[in-house]
Amino acid sequence: MSEATTVAEAPTIDSALPFNDAVPGAVIGVWAEETDKAYFVAPDKLLPLLTHLRDREQYDLLSSVTCVDYSAYKGKLRAGISERFDVVYHLYSTKKGGGPIRLHVRVPENETVPSATGVYPGANLQEREVYDLFGIKFEGHPNLRRVLTWEGFHGHPLRKDWKEAYYEEDAKPFKSRHPGGHYQWHEDKLPWGDNNTYPQGWDPDSWKEPVTYVPVSQAPYHGYGELDTQSIVINLGPHHPSTHGVFRMLTRVEGETILALEPEMGYLHRNHEKIGERNTWLMNMPFTDRLDYINSMSNNLGYALAVEKLLDIEVPERAQYIRVIMAEFTRIINHTWSIGFILNDLGALQTPALYAIEEREMILDLFEEVSGSRMMCNYMRFGGVVRDLTPGWVDRAKYLAYDRLPRALDQLDELLSGNEIIKARGRGVGYLSAEDLIALSVTGPMLRAAGVPYDIRKVEPYCIYDRFDFDVPTLPESDIYARYYIRLLEARESLKILQQALRDIPPGEVNAYASATLGQGFGTIMGGKGGYTFRPKEGEAYARIEAPKGELGFFVVSDNKPNPYRYHVRSPSFINLNALGPMSVGYKVADAIVILGAIDIVLGEVDR
Amino acid sequence: MFGTGLLKGLGVTLKHFTETFIDDRRKEPSRYEGSIQVDERRRIIHQPISQEGLLTIQYPEERRLLPERFRYIPMLIWDTEAGEDRCTACGICAKVCPPQCIWIVRDSDESGKPITRPAEFYIDVAVCMSCSFCAEFCPFDAIKMNHDYELAVYDRYPQLVYDKEELTVPIEYYAALWPTQYAAEEAQRAKQKEEERRREEEKKKAAEAKAQAQTAGGESGVAKPKRSKEELEVLKAQAAAKAAARKGEEGGAETEDAEAAKRARLEELKRKAAEKAAQRKKESGE
Amino acid sequence: MTTTPVAQFSDLKREQLNRYLHDRIQVPEELQANVMVTTLDKIYNWSRKSSMWPLLFGLACCAIEMIATAASRYDLARFGMEVMRPSPRQSDLMIVSGTVTKKMVPAIVRIYNQMAEPRYVLSMGACATGGGPFKEGYTVVSGIDKYIPVDVYVPGCPPTPEALLYGLIKLHEKVERQSITTVPWYRKGASEAVPVPILGPDIFDPRKVQIIKEYTLGSTAATGGAVAATGRLQPQPIPEDVKARIRAAQAKYRAMKKQPA
């Protein structure tokens, strides 16, 4: 894996810079260490460069768009740079595989950036997120509205100078807790008894909720011959049993046919990134559990990998195996769970879901035994895992991996795959071509169900996945049925990995630092204040893993302080929702629910 | 042929139904295999992983056997041997707590000099995320994770802001809940003590030699006990009662019952732990 | 219980029934097999608690544990709760399972208002109870009880299914203690709907407009409105009188626990 990169002190235009013969003047600087291929790009040349990269260099997947506010940066390396914001793009190639190209577009406040949606439609939701949280306007974006907060919200919360009502200090730990920690409810400190702030001079009496521009209202008008039908807007959610949480779909329908569908989210926006920037590096670990709360182990793994890149830690052999075992068990949980709930959406109410939960409980028992919690495992640490497996754990896991889970998957297969109703409802519904899916930045099982064998465990192996013998199953159909079936196939491949990992797991240390079993934590050797804080070197790192739902990436920026300067989660659920609208148009309302189910979102990760 | 998929699916459910039904009619259903009978109606279920299907745990009467590492809400350890809190108010748990839900007031003596003892210790359970960092990083093994999950209350304040009294449990309780870790910690502690004693002896010898050389020395002030014996007894009793009564209801009708249950459970857990340890030994021996 | 012999079973049944019988009115022995006397309260509470339908309503992580509770291993059906109704009109119990965000709160309050009385609210998990680990977030409501009344709080992050079941049992106990004559929903003057909070620059409760106005426009506005609040943000020791109140409440609570009622 590549190391974290550090920044060149000041970018200079150089004729030897890459892509300058193709798009002159686009790249105006490079990072000092070029391991991750990171370039400064002139804002006005961004679109030509992106087009060039997509068409000529095969970088067809715009994985992540995010932004960093450098106004409070305390590190040494980037102190001289005057522009406040840095919009960061990560591009990958589904054809070549390998590492990313990272583009940085630096913009001063109040200036706009050209929107990448024309080149990569998948930038849609992510640019909206950047606009919402940083206030950067993307020129040419078709639908630049707030996405996580609501229309009318004051300010842009991820800017470093924006303070919420709870605000106590810039960084944890808060000084008020010790030694004079007189307990007081935070709400009681504000006159209205809640964690709210209101801008100066705002008059609640004259407040009117802004009428939001909803694109579904501009759906094309259809008249069928003589019969002049009228289309109506139907709202699904945020409280709706089919939306897998608090999610809202605005659909414009004619009869039962969907003309346009607009996802509306943010109902579970829990400010992971703002809180994450206040937390210490370690404190973020249990928070990642709550991102995709079905797969806490994978989230832990992704975050640990990102920070390990900054820290340059070698993970012991046994810990690597444990990590893989946990991640693959998680994948099985997720896939059986999502199969169950796709079927729930199809109308097979509860029976498949109950069977899925049954196996999940057995795996959760194993998780609970090693980590102490069923769901929020908080098990990985930088440099390994927190504790060793308990005696007898491997045997139980072997029983599951060799005996019980294969049977359970066969049973699910037998129960569901041949079912005529599932075939009738699933075949040909929700089709989107592989090219469209890649353009919309969709990753994970959805993409593989469209025949693209893109699996990060294969194309850019992390941990020790290159040692295992497993296949990347693909299906060509790209419909609901394929998305259901690919999950079954993938769970079987996970079993293959599990069987090999459980067979080969070596004895040894589980953490690169001290053993944490004796109540000492691992921090004492890690150094730093009190052992629980440490300062990674200055720089930035992006680590991605093949989470069960797609590409889960963590983008962290360190300014050599105990807290991350920027902590961004590239969540697969959120970005896969780009495809929801295009996939649903033309199908019935009832299908839209299954299409959403087959994307397999978890709202904790969508809204973060 | 049309309909075969449906029939197959129905067959799977029917198989499931009959299997569990027949199993439940047996004299000793498989869900009770390896379970511990507490009394006539109550059991602690240890579901074997090889059990076919997954049978229901009838919660209030039957409980799941929790693994040792299970964590819910932190607890403070009262060292019964030393007769004092293990906590020294160093504040590491408050510093490492991700949602910052721990509030510690350091105690001070009459002259206002801070001493290593917490005067107040609050955990806001409505904020705690059960991450167990506090237990992981405490250098004195003074804060550990409790297994007690029956904490539902009717009022949020002050019931859900646990103060020191509510959090404190005697060390025996911890030893029963976390036998392996407790044993490991004690071993480590004994080793440390041994080392300390050795160092002390060496120091003493050196000091004696020095004293002999100088033939003069000041009388070292003997540290006054922080609390009187009676006070400690009272506190100890309070802590024990608190820990036992935690399961008790504020309705109050079942305090005795709850205490008895708690004791029974403690005994049960101890026994189970011993059994487990024996089994483990056997396993590792083989 | 499959292991219970039949003879014991009838004893068990009688034992269960005894709780719902009238304490004082004695039924003649020859009639005991056929006649049972109970109070209206008891029978009413019994029926109410025995089929309390929860709202199928999940917010966040805790919802997954709620589903696990409803699934076969813990089986909510044993408490007469197997039918989770997606419609608030048909449900009696709202399990607020997960983080409540400001964007979601208007919807929750609206759903609560739509529920037919008698209705109960169970706040599941740290987030719904008091904001939980996300309390410091700018779009997180620190406790659903700011907006709707809550009957039982279940702490934990997330509460295990057993913890949720324990909370439900506590709720049953609460229902058992209620009386038709005192519950608010049978008294004169229909209980009012909770005003739906409004999403402004930040969420605001229509009931608190006056305080907010004082802050943003009024006399204190001169010193900087919400900024002035930072002065109050400094940690302050709890005043002695408040402390005494808390102590008294705790002592009372403890005393209640010690004395068997």
Image (cartoon, rainbow, N blue to C red):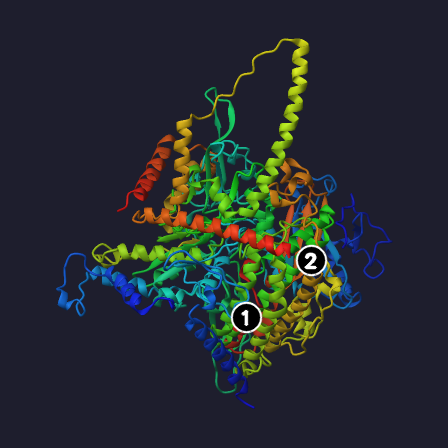
Q: Quadrant of the N terminus of chain A?
A: bottom right
Q: Are marks 1 and 2 on the same chain?
A: yes
> Depth check: C60 or A393 in front?
A393
Q: Chain of mark 2?
A: A
The residue pinned by badge 2 equals: A321
Q: Quadrant of residue B59?
A: bottom left
Q: Is any atom of residue A212 visible in this view?
A: yes
Q: What residue is rendered at 52% in x and 43% in y?
A: B144
Q: Secondary structure at mark 2?
A: helix
Q: Tell me which label, 1 or 2, sits earlier in the chain.
A: 2
Q: Quadrant of the C terminus of chain A?
A: bottom right
> Depth check: B260 or A412 in front?
B260
* Residue B256 drawn above or below residue C8: above
Residue found farthest to the right: A16
Mark 1 residue crowding within 10 angstroms, few (<14) / some (14–19) / many (20+): many
Tell us which disc is closer to us: 1 or 2.
Answer: 2
* Residue B218 drawn above or below residue A143: above
Direction from residue C72 to residue A218 in the image, left or right: right
> Depth check: A544 or B52 in front?
B52
The residue pinned by badge 1 equals: A597
Mark 2 residue crowding within 10 angstroms, few (<14) / some (14–19) / many (20+): many
Percent position of residue A166, x then y: 50, 43
Q: CA distance from mark 1 to mark 2?
A: 32 Å
> Depth check: C15 or A242 in front?
C15
Percent position of residue A319, x then y: 68, 53
The kind of residue tagged 1 is Gly
Numbered-mark total: 2
Q: Secondary structure at mark 1?
A: helix
